């Protein structure tokens, strides 16, 4: 269709829960990101990242396999400069690893508003909750 907007960037979504993956995928598409793949754990996520080299990785804190910190660190080795948004529940604090290479660029706490998600996508290096130091 001629009225469609072309995606501006590509992304990979990683979440242990299928409903969360569907939600994140839909929000990314709403904001004109092409979602190249989805995974529920670290191993399949790293395969997708290596194959598609996304500009953005959106990760939920709850994974079916593996841990968020090592996923972020290994993903950045595969695709240097890739932005990472970590979605975590506000009710349960997220303990980030001591290694800053395993920190997300954006920590977005659930529940969040669509506007907060859009801000997380739009502002490299900052967001609704700034990157931890």
Image: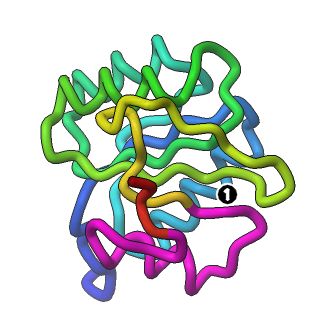
Disc tally is 1
Work out whether 123 lies above or below 46: below
- Which residue is most to the left? 80
Which residue is the site of mark 1?
23
The image's colour scheme reads rainbow
- Considering depth in this image, is 108 or 118 the residue closer to the camera? 108
Residues rendered magenta in the picture: 108-129
Examine the image and state in which quarter residue 17 appears. top right
Q: Position of residue 70 (x, y in %)?
A: 43, 21
Q: Residue furthest right?
A: 91
Q: Residue at x 22, y 68 (%)?
A: 8
Q: Is residue 17 left or right of residue 38?
A: right
Secondary structure of the residue carrying tag 1 is: helix
Q: Position of residue 58 (x, y in %)?
A: 47, 48
Residue 128 falls left or right of residue 33: right
For the point 29% across and 52% down, the residue is: 83
In what quadrant of the picture does the N terminus appear?
bottom left
In this picture, is 52 found above or below 109? above
Query: Could you tell me residue 57's position as x and y percent?
Result: 38, 45
Q: What residue lies at 63% left-to-right and 38% top-to-bottom?
A: 95
Q: Would residue 128 appear left or right of 88 to someone viewing this image? A: left
Question: Where 15 falls versus 126 (above or below)?
Answer: above
Q: Name which quarter of the figure residue 108 lies in.
A: bottom right
Position of residue 6 measured from the top left corner of the image (x, y, whole percent): 24, 72
């Amino acid at each position: 269709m001629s009225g469609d907007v072309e995606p501006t960037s590509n992304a990979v979504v990683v979440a242990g829960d299928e409903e969360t993956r569907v939600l994140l995928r839909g929000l990314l598409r709403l904001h004109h990101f092409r979602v190249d793949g989805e995974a529920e754990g670290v191993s399949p996520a790293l395969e997708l990242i290596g194959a598609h080299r996304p500009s953005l990785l959106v990760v939920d804190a709850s994974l079916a396999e593996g841990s968020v910190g090592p996923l972020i660190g290994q993903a950045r080795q595969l695709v240097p400069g890739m932005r990472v948004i970590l979605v975590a529940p506000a009710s349960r604090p997220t303990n980030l690893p001591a290694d800053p290479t395993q920190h997300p660029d954006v920590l977005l706490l659930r529940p969040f508003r669509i506007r907060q998600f859009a801000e997380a996508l739009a502002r490299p290096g900052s967001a609704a909750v700034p990157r931890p130091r």
